[in-house]
Amino acid sequence: MSITWNLLGAWKSIREKGFGAFLRELKDEGYLNCLADGNLLQTKIHNIGAKLIGVDKFGNKYYQNLETIHGRHRWVEYAEKSRYNASQVPPEWHGWLHFITDHTGDELLMLKPKRYSIEHKENLSGEGEEFIYHSKGHSLNPGQKDWTRYQSWQPTKTK
Amino acid sequence: MGLGLLASRLIRPQKTAARNLLLRSIVTKPELQSAEPATTPQPDLPPRTPLAGARVHFPNPDDAIEVFVDGYPVKIPKGMTVLQACEVAGVDIPRFCYHSRLSIAGNCRMCLVEVEKSPKPVASCAMPALPGMKIKTDTPVAKKAREGVMEFLLMNHPLDCPICDQGGECDLQDQSMAFGSDRGRFTEVKRSVVDKNLGPLCCDMIKLGRVLWGIVKLLGVQDLGMLGRGSGEEIGTYVEKLMTSELSGNVIDICPVGALTSKPFAFKARNWELKGTETIDVTDAVGSNIRIDSRGPEVMRITPRLNEDINEEWISDKTRFCYDGLKRQRLNDPMIRGADGRFKAVSWHDVLAVVAEIAHQVKPEEMVGIAGKLSDAESMMALKDFLNKMGSNNVWCEGNGPSPNADLRSGYIMNTGINGLENADVFLLVGTQPRVEAAMVNARIRKTVRGSNAKVAYVGPPTEFNYDCEHLGTGPETLTEIAEGRHSFCSTLSNAKNPAIIVGAGLFERSDKDAIFSAVEAIAKNGNVVRPDWNGFNVLLLNAAQAAALDLGLVPESSQSIESAKFVYLMGADDVDLEKLPNDAFVVYQGHHGDRGVYRANVVLPASAFSEKEGTYENTEGCTQQTLPAVPTVGDARDDWKIIRALSEVAGVKLPYDTVGAIRSRIKTVAPNLLSVEEREPATFWASLKPDATQKTSSTPFKAAIENFYMTDSITRASKIMAQCSALLLKK
C-alpha cells in the first residue's frame, strides 16, 4: 500500500520538477547510495510509514514509528549519506534518540545555555591527522612552538 | 541493575554488600566498622620490625624497661614516650602535633591509645612509658577515640581539598582516610580566616585546631603565635609582622596540613605531577641535601632531604626559594661580541674555533682561568688541565683569595664537622656571621647553645645573632690579644672542654690572611683546641666550589696575574674584580646566567646549572656529594666540562677524557677523596706543620663577607623571589 503511495509521490514529483531535478533529488537523498549501502537502504525502507519528528541544524532527520518493535521505534537518518557516524547527532537530539527523554531536540534547544555553550562538533577520529585536535606544542600541531619555559638573557640590554 | 553487575555480585565472595546496598549509599569497609575484640597476645610470632628504621639507643643498659604493645614485648630505654615505644614495636600511631625534632606539645590528641588499667585513652606522644605497661593500639576504644578526634579536627576544616596546595601530601587527608568517619555531623557554618601576610615566602591559609604549637621552637625567633581563643583562635604573626628568619621556609615542611604553605609554589602544581630528584644544594658551602621537584622542564619546588650530618631535615630559605632564578636570565646560545659591541648568536663550531684561535695567539703566562662559585669538581679539573696543557698555571676559584693555602687540608675545611659542632661548649667565631654565610651551620650552633648552654663569642663587625653571643672586638688586634693571653675570653677558652673556633672564609681575601691564620692557630694551641680526640679548628667556606677547588689545587701562580692577562676564561665567575684587567684582554664567559661576568665578556658559552648536570661538590666540612640532573638543559647549553673538553680538541691540546667516569678517574689521581661520595674525609695533618708566618696583621677591622643573604650568586641574583626577600626583609 505504502509502496504504491511512494511510487505515486515519485511520479508526482517527476511531473512537477522534471526528470533531471528528480534524479538530482534521488542522489541528494542518498537513494543511489542505497544500492551499495545496506544500512542506508534499511533506514530508507524503515522510514516508509514512519513519522518525521524533526530535523536538526545539520540536516539529520529523526523518525519515529510507534508501530514497530518497542525499543527500535526512534531512529535517525543522517544528512551525510556516505560517511555517517553516531557522533553527528547533536546533544539536544541525543536524549530523544536514546529514549532518555520524550522532549525532542527542538524543545531541548531552548535549554541550551547562551553564555558558555559551544557548537557541536562531530568526532573526526580516523578522518586524518589534520582534523584531530592537537594541543599547543604538539608535534602535529601546525602552529610553531614559539615559547620557552625559561627566560633567556637578552644581549641587547648590555652596555 | 545490569545483568553483568548481578553476575559479578554473585561471583564476588562478599557477604554483607547486597544487604547493605539498599540501606547505605556510601559503604565503608565492614572490617573497619566492626568492633573486634583486642588482639590476644601472641608471643610465638616473630617481633615486628621497628617503624621507618627507628633505632633504640640505650644510654645506660640498666635503664631498659619492657612494655607490651598489642601483646608484643618491647625493650626500650627509660624516658621514652608511649608513642616512641609503639614505633619501636612497629606500630604507626597517627599524629599531627608530634614531631621528633620539636618539643612535645600534646595538643592534637590524635595519638590516643588505650593503656590497660587506665580509665581513659591516653595521648601517647606525651605519656612516658612505664615498666610493664600494656599498650593497645587497635582496640575499639582507641579507634573510637581517633575517629572522634578526627571529627573535631575536621569540624572547622574548610572543604577546599581540591584546590588546597597540600592536597595529595596532607597528613590530615591521609589520616582522615585511614581513621576518620565517613560522614560529618557538623551542620553549623564553618569558620573562615583571612589570608595573612607572612612575607614573600610563606602564606597562611587556614588553621587546623591547635596542632601547630611547636613551630616556634625551630625558628628561634618568636614570630608566629596563636591569637585569640576557642574558635576565634588563629595563627598569626604579632602585629602583622613578616616572618624574617632565614629558615622560615621550614614551617612549610613541619606543618602537617595546608595551614602554612609555600607562597611561590601556591597553586602552581599538584604534587603528583612532580618528579623528585635527590640532589644537593650549591647556593652555600653547606651542601644541604635537597630534593628538586620538577614538572617537565621546570623546577617547581625544592624541599629538604634528611641528612643528619649536614642539614638534618631543614634547609635555608635561599636554598628553598632560589629556584625561580633557574628560569630567568639564562644563557641559551653561544654568542660572540661583534665590533659594534653587540652580542650575536653563533654556532658551537664557530665559537670554539674563535676561542681556540685567540687562545693560541696569547702567551701562555697571559692566560688566566677562574672557576666560579657554583663550579663542580669535574669542570674545575678540566679547566685546570686545559690551561696547564696550554702552558699556563694561572687558574683559581673565586672566593679563595690571591694566595690560598691549599697545602694543608685542615686549613680550609671544618675539621669538627657540622654534626660535631653539637659537642662543642665554647664557640669563637672569627670574621664570620654563620647566620648569613651558612644558615644550616648556624642552626647547629643555635641547637648546641639551646641544648647544652654553650657560650658563643665573635670577633668581627657587630651583627645580630639568634642566640646569645658576646662581641669581643672587630679586628685582628682582638685576635692578637686573645692569642697572647691578654683578653678576658682566654680563661673561658682554656676552661672549655671542647672549644671550637670557626674562621670565616671572607678572610681569605685579606692581604694579611696568613698572619690572621697564625694568630688563630696560636689561639687554638693555647686553648687546647686541637687534640687527638677533638679538633675544634674550623674554616667556614662561603661557596660550594671552594673546597673542591682547593683539593684539586686550583691555586694561581702569581697573585698579579689579572693585571697582565690577555686571555681570561671565566667559568661562571661573576664576583672577580675585573677592574684591573687590561682593555685589550679577551674574556670568555662560560656560565648559565647572564650575570656580572657577561658584561665584560667577548664570548659567551652557555653551560648548564646545578639542577641540570651531574657534578661533584665538596662541602665545607669535606663531605663529597653529587648533584643529579633534574631538568633538561636550556637551549643549546652544555655541561661545563664538556665545553672545555670540546675546546681543548679544537685548540689541539685534546684532554684525555670523554666521559664523566674518565674525568673522575683523572680526579682520583689528584684528590681521591672527591670520589668517595657521601663520605666525609677528615684532614689528616694539622697546621702545625706549617712554617711560621712572617706577615704582620693590619689594623683594618673585619668586613662582613656577605652583604645580602638572599643574593650571593648568579642563580639567586636572577631570582625574583630572592629580590623580593632582600627588598622586604633586609630593609626592615
Image: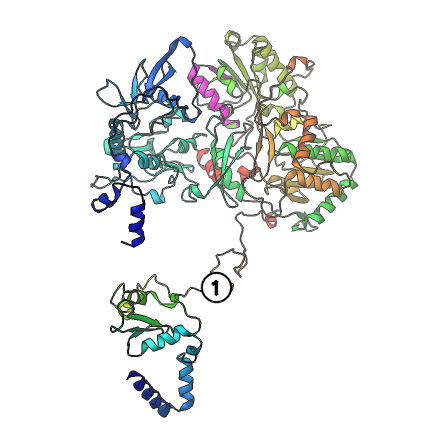
Horizontal side of B393 relative to B636 (left or right) equals right
Give coordinates of residue B382: x percent, y percent. Answer: 69, 35
Q: Residue at x 31, y 66 (%)?
A: A92
**Residue B535 belongs to the span the image colors magenta:** no
User: Does residue A117 show up?
Assistant: yes
Q: Residue at x 39, y 21 (%)?
A: B47
Which residue is nearer to you in this view: A65 or B234? A65
Q: Which amino acid, mark 1?
A: Gly
User: Does residue B463 show up?
Assistant: no
Horizontal side of B409 relative to B444 (left or right) equals right
Q: Residue at x 68, y 17 (%)?
A: B695
Give coordinates of residue A108: x percent, y percent. Answer: 27, 67
Q: Residue at x 34, y 61 (%)?
A: A116
**Residue B445 belongs to the span the image colors magenta:** yes
Give coordinates of residue B501: x percent, y percent. Answer: 55, 16
Q: Main secondary structure of the magenta part?
A: helix
* Above or below, B90 relative to B207: above
Give coordinates of residue B129: x percent, y percent. Answer: 32, 16
Residues shaded magenta? B437-460
Which residue is nearer to you in this view: B28 or B186? B28
Q: Which residue is mark 1?
A: A126
Q: Quadrant of the C terminus of chain B?
A: top left
Horizontal side of B526 relative to B439 (left or right) equals right
* Above or below, A34 relative to B310: below
* Above or below, B511 relative to B132: below
Q: Indicate the colouring scheme.
A: rainbow
- Per the image, label 1 sits on a secondary structure element best described as loop
* Above or below, B585 relative to B132: below
- In the rendered structure, the residue with mark 1 lies on which chain? A
Looking at the rendering, which quadrant does residue B221 occupy? top left
Q: Residues within 10 Å of mark 1 (few under 14, many from 20)?
A: few
